[in-house]
Each structure stands twice: as structure tokens, then as C-alpha cells.
Image: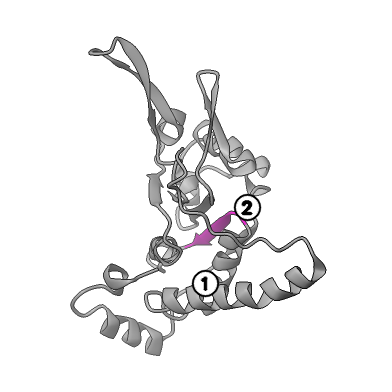
Amino acid sequence: MTDANPTVDVGTESTADGDALRIPTVERLCADIETNVSRVIVGHDDAIEHVVTAVLGRGHVLLDDVPGVGKTMLARSIAKSVDCTFSRVQFTPDLLPTDVTGVNVFNQKTREFEFQSGPVFGNIVLGDEINRAPPKTQAALLEAMEEGQVTTDGRTRELPTPFTVIATQNAVEPNRTYDLPFAELDRFMKKLHLGYPEPDEEAELLGRTVGDHPIESLEP
């Protein structure tokens, strides 16, 4: 990948004084991101804080909840707030590992194979309803989540930095889903439940979405 990829630098200086100076900076950064995301997501301040912490800590998040509580919108608003690329993988029973990582395609003009990157090559990757795909397809994310790279046809490619997987799973239809293997669960820094908003929060959300959706005007 090129140097054009955005990087969220939350590291600290090597000296003790430098470490102390950077802590307020990180706190302000987190607060600014959380405030920005709250313009879109209503009633889930704790979840927003946890997801922001995971993104800045280069971890991954599993959102385990019923449909319609804002899991996808949360991932999109986080990506927009930190000015990172957003990609989505819609997991289905017939999804192949190469649909996630990418595949080599033969170019008839050049007579050579060219790699077409999959949606995993993003900064914030939404794995939507990850438990609908069989374990073989889910395993395509293991190397990416652990090492920040993917290997296809014997060649290893680095993923952009930062890289965070925000996966969702639907707990409503357990008979039509697959259990996430322990090796995959172990790669998530946090597992969150959003829950339904309160009636007053639903009213506020309705008022915000009259006309243009707030996600459209969200700025980094």
C-alpha cells in the first residue's frame, strides 16, 4: 500500500516527560471523536467510547446484538470521524475466503495475473453478520486481525494502517448461523451489546434524521 493511507498516531514519546505530555492529547482526541460520532449514534455513549478505544488501540470489536440497533452506522461514523477508509464485507453462507482477502485475476491484455484486493484492505472493515459465513470463510480474517497482513497464492501483502475489524453477529437466528471459533473470538479486543434506545432517544434520533441523515454531513 502507498504512504497515502491515513494513520492515527496515538503513540507516546520515549521519555517520561513526553509520555505525560501526550496523555492529554490522546484524551482530547478520544473526546472529539466520541462527540462527533454522537451526532449520528444516539443513546450508546458507552459503546462509542469502547469502539473508539479499540480503534486507537489497534484492536478489533465484536458487536453482538439484534438487527436495527445501529451497529453498521456506528462503524461508518467511526471511520468518517477518524478520516479513514471504510469497507464492508456482507458475510453469507456462500461467501468465499477470496471474496474477503482478494484474488489474482488474469489480465488478457498484459497476459499476466493481477491482484484485485478484497474489502479487507480498508482501515475500518465492517464484517456484517460474520456468523452467517462458514468457519473456513471466517478464517480469512485470522491472519489479518492478528498480523495486519493477508497471504494469497504464497504472497503476503500488508494491510493499511490503522486497521480495525468491527464485526457484527446476529443472535436472533441461531439455527442459521455458525459459532465463531475460539481463535477468532480471541482476536477481538472487545465484545459489546448495544441494545434498543429509550423512547426519548428514539424521538431524538427521529428528529435528527428528518431530511438529510447526519452521517452525510459528518466531518473528521
Q: Please give left or right for residue 81 compared with residue 149 in the image.
A: left
User: Which image quarter holds the C terminus?
Assistant: bottom left
Above or below — where is 71 with respect to 24? above
Looking at the rendering, which quadrant does residue 203 occupy? bottom left
Residue 14 place in picture, x, y as percent:
77, 60
Looking at the rendering, which quadrant does residue 139 occupy? top right
Residue 89 place in picture, x, y as percent:
40, 44
Q: Are marks 1 and 2 in contact (CB under 8 Å)?
A: no
Of residues 55 and 219, which is closer to you in this image? 219
Residue 48 badge: 1
Q: Which residue reaches farthest right?
A: 16
* Residue in the picture at 52% in, 51% down: 165
- Range of magenta residues: 58-65
Of residues 193 and 117, which is closer to you in this image? 117
Secondary structure type for disc 1:
helix
Magenta includes 48? no
Which of the two labelled residues, at mark 1 and mark 2, occupies the earlier sequence position?
A: 1
Residue 83 badge: none
Magenta includes 60? yes
Q: Please give left or right for residue 149 compared with residue 16 in the image.
A: left
Q: Please give left or right for residue 174 compared with residue 187 in the image.
A: left
Q: Which residue is mark 2?
A: 188
Secondary structure type for disc 2:
loop
